[in-house]
Amino acid sequence: MNWKYLWLIVFVSFLVINCGGALSLTPTEMVKFSGREKLPTSKEYPNYGAVVLYENKNVKLYLDSEWEVNVKKTYHTAILYFDDRAKDLLTEKIYLDPDISLIDFSARTIKPNGEIVELSEKDLFPTNTNSNSTYFTDEKSVKFTFKGVEPNSIVEYRYTINNQRSFLNGDLWAIQTSVPKLYSKYSLELPNIFFRYGYNWNFVEQNISVGKPQRYKNMLTQESRKDASKIYYWEVKNIKAIKDEINRPPYRDIAQHIRVALKWNDWQDLSHIYWKLIKNSFQISNKEYFKKLLNSIVGKSKEEKDIIKKIFYYVQENYRYIAVNVGESGYVPNLPETIIKNKYGDCKDMTVLNVVLLRSMGIKAYPALINTADRGDILKTLTSLDFNHMITYVVDKNGKEYWLDGTGNSCPLGEVSSAIEGMTALVIKNNGKSFFKKVPNSSSSDNKLVRKISVNYKDDNSITGNATLTFYGNYNLSIRSLLKNESQSKIDNVIEKYVKTNAPNLELQNINFDDLTNIQDTFNISFDFNSDHLGTQTGTMLVFKPHIFELKSELGKYSSKERNYNIQLREPFKIIDNVEFTFNPLKYSIESIGNNVFKNNKVGRFYSKNKKTENGKIKCFREYVINNKIITPKHYKEFKQIHKTIARGNEEMIVLKTK
């Protein structure tokens, strides 16, 4: 038995739900864990709709009758509900992958008068975790909703999930959440055989200091009858809630939590073992077949960049991305021949194809493990395979680097989605050695939306016109992804809906757009439009805003005086509007074209200017720029200044006067 591989491989399965167990804590017993004698009141927590009275998460590793490693996790939580601000806490979702069974489920509502409303297995309903028809995942879940809840009720649940043939890759104790907690406990149980084989575990505290865990004495467990276990635990009391701020950083960056994982000597030790596990997936058994495939992809191309582009686009365009976590494939990719036969794969499979095809052409290409931005960057102090994505790192003969994400089916060569920009990747070489490498960030000039609009104002106060919208960088990727998921017959409707989010009064005709089957650096949409009125006619004056597309100030979202966390945007960006108004100079004269509005600081820039170019024409220019995706509390005031300037710019009007 190779224990290193045993602890490394994850297998998961969706089995029959067995419900049992019971909830036995009284409300008085719940609060005593935190040192209180009675339940808190809403007056003590005026800013929250609930408070967690008691929380206990137990993680237990044990050996089954076949000496396979299993992980059992038990969650027990009791919440005191005050009002609808916490209504989201009344529904709980339990995520289940293949090889995971849900056991010992029980839940109840304890009303203020002591009446108890029990839930049973009949109250568990399956849910779809992803309904996107172009994205498949075998991840499943069940959910339940508490019944009979009224203010000052206690809702309580306890359930256990059993993960067959699993391991201690990485677990998270979410100490801090959106509501305050009176008491939270985490315990970890490991059989002694785990230590006798030379293994140990490690933990890292994030945004909190609780010190080393306490430990119970050795004891026999129901599952591991052959072996005693060591049980470690922490307890924390009176935990403040995470401050709720719009566009705050991901949970792992700001919240109090602890992560635990199997202890490795270092990252080289882990990557060496992982490479041994996956290296067969990067080997080609039928070299003659791959030679023919490469000839059909690359043709007569000799330039490395051209070869890289053709291979990258071939994988994007010919293989459907699906997220599958069946058995060993949770960490181990399929073989190249299997992927080609299936014509689909997950991020690991897409990486395999890119790597083996590029290496077959003598180009240096490596798999790279990475986290998406919503999870937070890799934690280098905890050696673990706690990643959720794999991409390809390429270096040409001149040292130029490329990052290839085969799951982004609209990415031009040299670009990646905002989800992995700036994140740290663990690049694994052929010998199993690894190194960390940052994925470059894009700039505001990379991510642009340029709108060129011509507007004809008619004497009856209606308008006609045409517009061309050009998308660059992540704007290009986003709009292509949005449209690529739609049928050809529905694309016009999707575009019209998209345009009307910022120009609600326009009626669109003659919509045209670039070919979605060809991956390009830009994407263009053009259309004609009309509207039955423009602005407001007051006596002899016609007053209207100089821009057809709205640009809303977000001051309302950022109304607080101070900021606790960084503002984390999707990407830096630039929006440019060029609008030309044409009107009848025999009927109207220009009374006012408004004032120029300008603000430039370290965060970004807003500039708006209108000018008369010739008789009967006015040109309007507007530019809005945010320089970085991360805005620190130090620059929060400057960020708000930009939006104050946008609000002021929105008040500037063009005034025409009837002659």
Image (cartoon, rainbow, N blue to C red):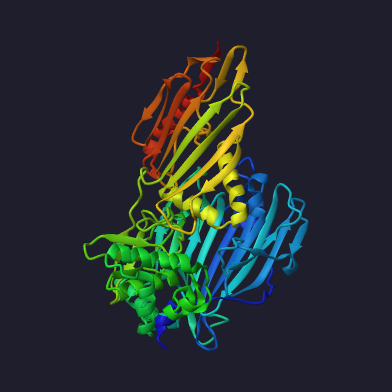
Q: Nearer the viewer, residue 104 or 576?
A: 576
Q: Nearer the viewer, residue 168 or 339?
A: 339
**Percent from the top left, x then y, of residue 649?**
47, 26
Viewer can see residue 47: no
Residue sticking out furthest to the top: 659
Question: Is 356 left, or right, of 527 in this rendering?
Answer: left
**Percent from the top left, x then y, of residue 448?**
41, 43
Q: Nearer the viewer, residue 312 or 95?
A: 312
Residue 397, above or below 373: below
Q: Name the image quarter holding the C terminus.
A: top right
Q: How many marks?
A: 0
Q: Nearer the viewer, residue 53 or 123?
A: 123
Residue 522, above or below 519: above
Q: Name the image quarter holding the N terminus.
A: bottom left
Residue 29, above or below 320: above
Residue sticking out furthest to the left: 398
Viewer can see residue 95: yes
Quadrant housing residue 625? top left
Quadrant housing residue 273? bottom left
**Percent from the top left, x then y, of residue 500?**
59, 39
Write the residue at 55% across / 80% down.
221
**Percent from the top left, x then y, of residue 526?**
51, 43
Write the residue at 23% across / 62% down.
399
